Amino acid sequence: MKKFYFKSVFATAVLLGSTLTSCENDSPFPSNPSNKQGQYIISATAGGANYLLQAESLDEGSVTAVGGGMETPTGTMWHFYEDKYLYRLQYNQGNAGVTSSYQLNANGAIEARDSEYNITRFTTYATVDNYVMTVSAADTDKKDDAGNVAKGLGITYLHATNEITSNATLPCENFLGNGEYVSLAGIVEANNLVYTSVIPMGLSRYGVQSDGGKWVTNPDLITQEDGGTGSGAYGTGVVPGTQYPDYAWVAIYPNEQFAILNPTIIKSDKIGYACGRNRSQYLQTIWAADNGDVYLFSPGYGRLTSNKYQTPGKLPSGVVRIKKGAKEFDADYYVNLEELTGGQPLYRCWHMTGDYFLLQMYTNGLNGTGIATTKLAVFKGEDKTLRYVTELPEPALITSFANEPYNEKGVSYMPVVTNDGNQPALYRIDPVTATATKGLTVTADGVSAVGRLTIQ
């Protein structure tokens, strides 16, 4: 089966101003640029607008988002479906978002495909078989006697070839057998199976009242008032965070039809729930090595509690494993990442090649907003070793990485944005040596995604 990649990127909504005039010399960007057509596609922002740029190489040269490339509507996430299509996934809070996709035409130029798609807000997305899937919180049509609505997961399937959209709702109350509703964070295809990290979210009003209140471990955890802000907001009568922060769950499905299939659910008590966090986004930390082993990484976010209604966790950042063909965690495998980093936690991670994984690390302790995460490290799964990547800009100069590297020929390319006046650049990261080499320069304010497309 095919692998997929979990991305989390952003783009802004303001359009670039009109054609440059004699004032263009005041711009930090060069005038009269030209982008050669190439199969490498870079999503970049400049002057408040988003552009898709084409490059012939990621190892050298430069491209620019000013006066070149294809201007596109704003996109929340940019997701490559294999080497065929690039999806602009649009997130709207609680509403439908217009999503579009792009391809290379017969002349090798980037162009928009005909169809647009309406999707709800989403917290995770992936390529699974023939589909781009998005998953978000959704209400079901089930209510208790008091009118409390049972929570679910809304799944949208975008068929990549036929450009057809279908939807399904997955019930998620008591999904893990502990009464709590859940979210999903990352989906992996491997070994003719589909693996997803399941994140317990606490008890909704429906869950608090369910089965005579038996799922509430401590009545003091039930909120007595509205509180919190943003993604941490909660109402009265709920348990606003998981009661089980020091466990990790994986659901294993035979295929992508989550709403009509019963998964095998497995649990580990060696790590906490497995996802990166950036406010409302749940970032993928479940990945398959090339040999079919599935690795599950946890930052240890259970240690972050912001109010008296949350159950604190204790476990540090760690890694567990599911061996190829198994439907249980490897009892002999565990890595405490913070013992390898001098106490710094994991933020998020990606598969590179073989059993090498690229880790984005906190540099100043754990937080749930993605701040101070400006170091990269290479983790080798079988050897249980971690090495920080050298030859990158100094961590204090780095303002952001792209939301995912692009992997090719055994190396990874990661866009890096700095605050030292230099333009963003792609860095070629060798997993064996854990060293980075500066490659393509991108004249832009930011770079959100990079990948490769072939002519369709």
Image (spheres, rainbow, N blue to C red):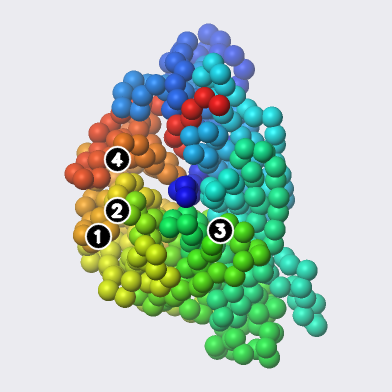
Can residue 90 be spotted in the picture?
A: no
Q: Position of residue 233 (x, y in %)?
A: 61, 66
Q: Is residue 340 left or right of residue 231?
A: left
Circle 2: is it few (<14), some (14-19), or many (20+) Cα within 10 Å? many
* Label 1 environment density (alpha carbons within 10 Å; few <14, some 14–19, many ≥20): few
3D distance between C-alphas at marks 4 and 3: 28 Å
| Depth order, front residue of 382/334 | 382
Of residues 147 and 396, the one nearer the viewer is 147
The location of residue 319, given as percent across then percent down, is 33, 65
The mark nearer the N terminus, 3 or 1, is 3
Task: Determine the CA span between mark 2 and mark 4.
Answer: 11 Å
- Which callout, 1 or 2, points at the residue further toward the start of the chain? 2
Q: Amino acid at mark 4?
A: Gly
Occupied quadrant, residue 115: top right
Tag in front: 3 or 2: 3
Instruction: Give the residue displayed 70% in from the left and 46% down from the top.
Output: 165
Q: Residue at x 59, y 86 (%)?
A: 216
Label annotation for residue 255 = 3
Q: Are marks 2 and 4 in contact (CB under 8 Å)?
A: no
CB atoms of marks 1 and 2 within 8 Å: yes
Q: Quadrant of residue 396?
A: top left
- The disc, 1 or 4, on the residue closer to the chain's N-terminal end is 1
Per the image, the residue denoted by label 2 is 355
Q: Which residue is mark 4?
A: 410
Marks 3/2: CA–CA distance: 24 Å
Q: For the C terminus, which image quadrant?
A: top right
Q: Which mark is residue 382?
A: 1
Q: Residue at x 67, y 38 (%)?
A: 163
